[in-house]
Image (spheres, grey):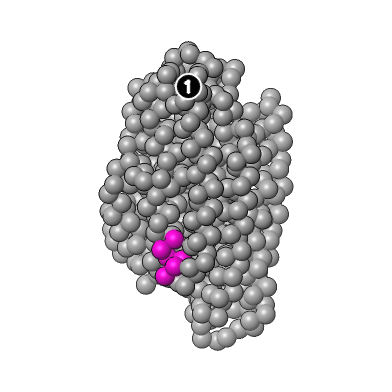
Amino acid sequence: MTFESLNLLPAAPEIFVLVMVCVILVVDLFLDEASRHWSYALTLSTLVVTAFLTLGGGSQARHAFNGMFVDDQMARILKAFICIAVAAMLVYSRAFTRDRGLFRGEFFTLSLFATLGMMVMVSASHFLTLYLGLELMSLSLYSLVALSRDSATATEAAMKYFVLGALASGMLLYGLSMIYGATGSLQIAEVASRIATKQPNETLLVFGLVFIVAGLGFKLGAAPFHMWVPDVYQGAPTAVTLLIGSAPELAAFAFVLRILVEALGAHVLLSQWQGMLILLSVLSMAIGNITAIAQTSIKRMLAYSTISHMGFMLLGFLSGTPNGYGASMFYIAVYVLTVIGAFAMVMLLSRRGFDADNLDDFKGLNQRNPWYAFIMLLLMFSLAGVPPAVGFYGKLVVFQAAMDAGFVWLAVVAVLFSLIGAFYYLRVVKLMYFDPPQDLSPLPSTADVRALLTVNGLAVLVLGLLPGGLMDLCQRAIQASLH
């Protein structure tokens, strides 16, 4: 194989991230605590340049590394969203991490390594590349959760995350090995072709599929594989919780699409994984929404909220149609946009020596800062699916996808759970606007955080009023990658 035949150009964004991680690691060695903002600036610049590199790839799908890596339209859009999400996390968390001694090179480089893992997952067209990206992301996130070495809760959360994540990875790997045994290939397109034409051993395929769906359920945080989510969300530093709850969900969406739709989407297997996803979806919506009502911790509430939102996202997948997959992609993009803002508000209410983890910390926020209270109201409306916030349209399109596929009863169940979920989101609005504040101290924030939070909140409103552009983008990306 010659160097030219490798065709490294489709992987240019990933190569750039890897080079910059090495540069930041070396530069950070020579910086003292007061000069650490240079590492921060380099990390942010890396993410911005990477986003531009991904979007500059043209409209045609390109392959690299002998077909193990694909750079298609869906990959470009998701990678740009991932870079934006991680950059937003860094901006929002600067004061929070500085107050807690986390504003250092390890935090920046591990965030970039996790980003690199997500990008590799999104562009994988081979089982090994998928697994490589997944492990790179997972190992970086385990380390980030444990970065607060003096915190017993963070260490405990990292241990739970690591042990359950390793179990999920093992199940996934076992499932992939069974698919390889049945088809004789690890290439996603080749696996799909052999299932369609050669009719391999169906029993082996279904067994492999069960293990794969279980592994994916763990990675998505879908019930009944959700047990790690609340503890990790609560135990990790809020900046890391923001990261875990946002960008990896975009990568997980691509992971599910590449394996279930592109590799195992043949009609003989579609009905099998459809049934499994229906079970996962209903359990996630039920456990997530009902358990969230009982929570007094905002981070645990948002953790159970994540579980329920994964159930809603799966509604689009189980429809088994490109329109359904596009609806799921729109839903996950909208969810990530909203949850970033919600965790940013939690960090904004925190200060040195105090973490705003209780719902009561939001009491009277309107009296302390009416603008931040209004932004939080928009974010809660979006998560609850209340118009005119964009979350309403996100739920509408996945409900529509389920109904178009003939699952009317499932759409009705989802609407009922959505109504249950509205209770705990609107409870936060009630606390902000109708309860007296426990603390009247002002909320200090820098100009960049105020500007980004404003853009974040208004984007939720504007996209709710004009969702067509983003929806069309998602549908076109799915159509392009499936043909």
In the image, is residue 432 part of the stretch drawn in magenta? no
Please tell me whether the stretch drawn in magenta is mainly helix, strand or loop. Answer: helix
Viewed as shown, does residue 146 lie left or right of 377? right
Q: Residues within 10 Å of mark 1 (few under 14, many from 20)?
A: many
Residue plotted at (41% across, 45% down): 386
User: Could you tell me the amino acid type at mark 1?
Assistant: Gly
Q: Is residue 22 above or below residue 266?
A: above
Q: Position of residue 405 (x, y in %)?
A: 45, 72
Q: Position of residue 72 (x, y in %)?
A: 37, 61
Residue plotted at (33% across, 56% down): 471
User: Which quadrant is the C terminus positioned in?
Assistant: bottom left
Residue plotted at (36% across, 36% down): 457
Number of numbered markers: 1
Which is more toward the observer, 204 or 452?
452
Corner quadrant of residue 401: bottom left
| Extent of the magenta region | 399-404
Which is more toward the observer, 63 or 480?
480
Residue found at the very far top of the displayed protein? 441
In the image, is residue 403 part of the stretch drawn in magenta? yes
Mark 1 — residue? 364
Q: Is residue 307 above or below residue 426?
A: below
Q: Position of residue 94 (x, y in %)?
A: 47, 26
Residue plotted at (57% across, 65% down): 278
* Label 1 secondary element: loop
Q: Position of residue 244 (x, y in %)?
A: 55, 42
Does residue 390 appear in the picture of this structure?
yes
Which is more toward the observer, 415 or 175?
415
